[in-house]
Image: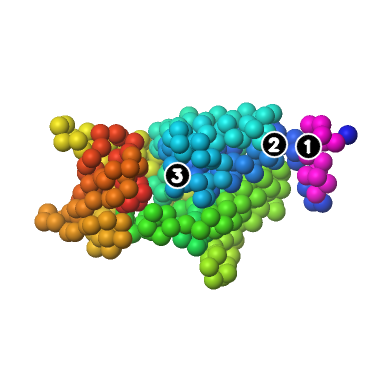
Amino acid sequence: MTGTPTDRFARVRALHGLPDGAVERWQGASVLVAGVGALGCVAAELLARAGVGHLVLVDRDIVEWTNLPRQLLYSEDDARQSRPKASAARARLLDINSSIRIEAFDDQLDGESIHSYAHGVHAVVDGLDNIEARQVVNEWCVDHRVPYFHAAAVGWEGRSLACLPGEGGACFRCAFPELPAPGTLETCESAGIFTPAAVRAANAATAECLKCLAGMEAAVDRRLHSFNALTGEACAIGPIKRDPDCPCCGRGERPFLRAGAGSRVLALCGRGAMQVLPARGAPPVELGPLLARLSREGDFAMAEGNRLVGTIDSGAAGRPLGLEVHRDGRVIVRGTADERQARLAVSRYIGT
Ligand SMILES: [Zn+2]
C-alpha cells in the first residue's frame, strides 16, 4: 500500500546495520535543537523526517531576508512577516511530519533558560552561532549526562564533534579548552557563510545524534571533523579523549551556567541607546583585531578611553546603529530602544 502513513519508514528500516526498533527509539526520543539558523534548520528537519517524537526548538531571532539563502526552513513570507524563527520552523516542520510534538521557544538560550528548555531531553544538537551559548549547552550536558552534538560553520569552513557522556567521553571544552576573547572570532557577518558548508556540518552532527538515539553508541564517530568547502580539504582528529584537567568535565567549573541569563542589557535613559554588559568572567575585548573586522562593516575608529566607535549600516530594522565597544566588554548600541535588537547587534558584530 503506497501513499499511506504506515509505510513511511520502510526505506529507513531497510537500512543494513540499523538495529531493530531504531525507528521506535527515535519516536520515543526528545531532542533540543539549540538555535534554528543555518545549522539548526538542517538538524531539525533531519530529526523531524526521521520521526524523532519530540523536538524542542529555541532561537531568539526573527527571520530576515538575509537568512533565506541558507536557512532552509524559512520562506519569503516568514521574512516579510518578521516571524520568530523557532515558531516559523515549527510550522514548517509540522507540514513535514504532523505526527511528532514540537515545542518552539522564541527566546535566548542561556545559563538560566537552558534548565527549562533542555529538561528531559535525550540529546542536544548545536545550531548556535556563538561560543558562550555553546559553553552553556556543554556545561548543562556534562551535568545531566546528555550527549551534545556540536556543529559550527563560518565562511567556507565547518566542523562537527559528538560529545558523549560516560567513560573517556570528551566534552566540548576538552576539545576547545581556550576561550577566545570577544571580537577575535570571525562571524557569519564578517566572513559570510557558504550554505553547503553549514549543511554539511549540521548533517554530520545530526547523523551521529540519530545513530546515538538508535542505540548505536559504539558506532558514533568521536573524532573532531573539520573541512573547507573551498579547497576540499578535510581532516578528522581523534577520537577526542577526555581531558582529566578539562575546566568543565574534569575540574567541574560551571562559569557559563552560573552566569545565568547571559549578557545583560540595560536601557540608557533618554539616550535612545542600550548598554549590553558582557557575561561575568568574560575576558577583555581585543580592540585592534576587532577594529580591523568592524571596518569592513562600517566606519569605525578608535576613540579616547580605550573604545571603538562607529556605525553599522544594516541594523535589523533597516536603519543604522551606532556601536561603541569598550575594552571591558561593555557595548553601547545607539539608535534602538529594543533590547533584542541591541543584543543581536552585539552578538553579530562583536561576537560573544
Ligand atoms: Zn571536558
Q: Is 79 included in the stretch rendered in magenta? A: no
In the image, taking residue 88 as reference, residue 62 lies left or right, namely left
Q: From what the image shows, is residue 192 above or below residue 217?
A: below
Q: Amino acid at mark 2?
A: Gly
Determine the secondary structure under disc 1: loop
In the image, taking residue 185 as reference, residue 300 lies left or right, namely left
The residue located at (64%, 32%) in the rendering is 95
- In space, the residues marked 1 and 3 are separated at their CA atoms by 34 Å
Determine the secondary structure under disc 2: loop
Q: Amino acid at mark 3?
A: Trp
Residue, disc 2: 51
Where residue 265 appears, as percent x and y from the top left, is: 27, 36
Q: Residues within 10 Å of mark 1 (few under 14, many from 20)?
A: some
How are the residues colored? Answer: rainbow
Q: Please report the bounds of the magenta region as a residue range.
A: 2-15
Residue, disc 1: 8
Q: Earlier in the sequence, mark 1 or mark 3?
A: 1
Q: Which mark is residue 65?
A: 3
